[in-house]
Amino acid sequence: MSALKNPFSGLMLCSFLVILQCISAEVGKLVCFYDAKSFVREGPAQMSLTELEPALTFCNFLVYGYAGIDDENYKIKSLNPTLTHDRQHYRHITALRQKFPHVRFLLSVGGDQDLDSEGVADSGKYLRLLEQPEHRKSFQASVVAELNNHGFDGIDLSWQFPKNKPKVQQGVFKRVWGSFRGLFSSKSVDEKAEEHKEQFATLLGELRSALRGSGQLLTVSMLPHVSAELFIDVPTVLNNVDFVNLGTYDFQTPERDPKEADLPAPLYEMYDRDPSHNVMHQVQYWLNQTSQISAHKLHVGVATYGRAWIMTRNSGITGYPPIPAANGAAPAGRQTVTPGLLSWPETCELLQQQPKDRDVPHLRKVGDPTKRFGIYAYRAADDKGENGLWVGYEDPTTAALKADFVQAKGLGGVALHDLSMDDFRGQCAGEKFPIMRSIKFKL
């Protein structure tokens, strides 16, 4: 029967087309994370608001990181009072809406930046907040006030749940043993994980109700090595948030694996590795817990930095990962000033540099013809056991491949971590924000 003879079929077709249009409007998004500490860094790492602005032409969302939680009253607080004195920097950021009206500005809470007295990400108060209704109510009221007072379009919860513990490497049997051991050890990070899962879903529902009237956004960012299986009621969470940014990076880092260097963010599972340490596994877990129609709410996290280890004489000379007998984090770069962490322009410089000392050659880049795992660069240790370096990283090409993956899976977009680690001055190849641009052009 034709649509003209059956008005109901025509109505169904129109409704279906409307749904498709709504979903298509919510895919291909670029969520740009902005670490506000870059505004006050010294030297080449400092990024002014003027240098930030070119990126906003491409970003659909700017996530300002990070705020924290006051462990006495459970209200939202600034993590850098000097920078946000009287919240001026907040207002300077949200004022950019006048130049870039298409961008939604979100304030992120947590992000592994809310530290305890020993300088470790504090998950305890994030769990305590969930446990008491009065703590959740205090947090909710402070969030609404903070957003309204400073012009943010919403809140991003980069919640500091306890992280899975690194799995001990067991030689040729490490994959089988790691999977078996994980069945029993992963839950030990939080004995009340099931309760916290329900309470986090409750918090999101309460925030959703509080923000709905003003049209403000509520999003969640998963941190690397936080188990969604332990802490996230996926269907309920996706029903209450506008989107979720997945922590699909930093699977391997010198902090977690100082003795073995490996690719930090492979797209697909690699042989003899933890089967969960890849983008595909993380995405598929979320898709398996909900309907495909919610896929547009998932954003794949892509990092603009590399993870770097020191290679020793016992690490071999081929550079083929995993690299054994690594000696922990590589020395800090001039920009990041953080051992084991190299921004894209720092990595690019190491690939191109013409060393004054002929005994210290530039890094050798090794590509990935399969387009499945990622790229790396290395310099084997010399005869004295010195100058060895191994870096697993993203560049514009690999970032574009992940944007292709996002489109092929029908996901919502990419969450870029973060703008201040991209080449925002164009010092490597002359183009500013090359990783961000490559992602956006693919999306």
Image (cartoon, helix red, strand yellow):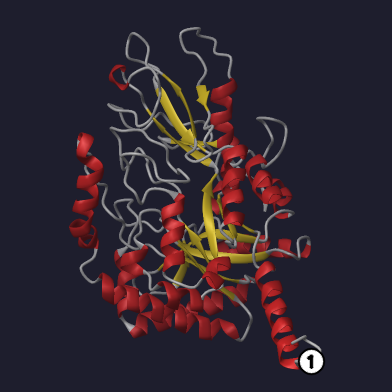
Residue 137 % position (x, y): 41, 83
- Residue at (23% x, 54% y) in the render: 182
Give neighbour class at mark 1: few <14, some 14-19, many 20+ (Cα, 10 Å): few
| Residue 239 position (above or below residue 4) | above
Name the residue type under label 1.
Answer: Lys
- Residue at (71% x, 48% y) in the render: 441
Looking at the image, which is closer to me, 77 or 369?
369
Residue 26 % position (x, y): 65, 68
In the orientation shown, which residue stands out farthest toward the front? 1
Looking at the image, which is closer to me, 232 or 41?
232
Q: Is residue 441 left or right of residue 112?
A: right
Q: Residue 33, can we see it? A: no
Q: Is residue 275 left or right of residue 443?
A: left
Looking at the image, which is closer to me, 440 or 152?
440
| Residue 79 position (above or below residue 154) | above
**Residue located beneath label 1 in the image:** 5
Residue 336 % position (x, y): 50, 38
Quadrant of the image occupied by residue 126 = bottom left
| Residue 77 position (above or below residue 33) | below
Under circle 1, the secondary element is loop
Residue 410 % position (x, y): 59, 61
- Residue at (54% x, 66% y) in the render: 295
Number of numbered discs overlaid on the protein picture? 1
- Residue at (71% x, 54% y) in the render: 56
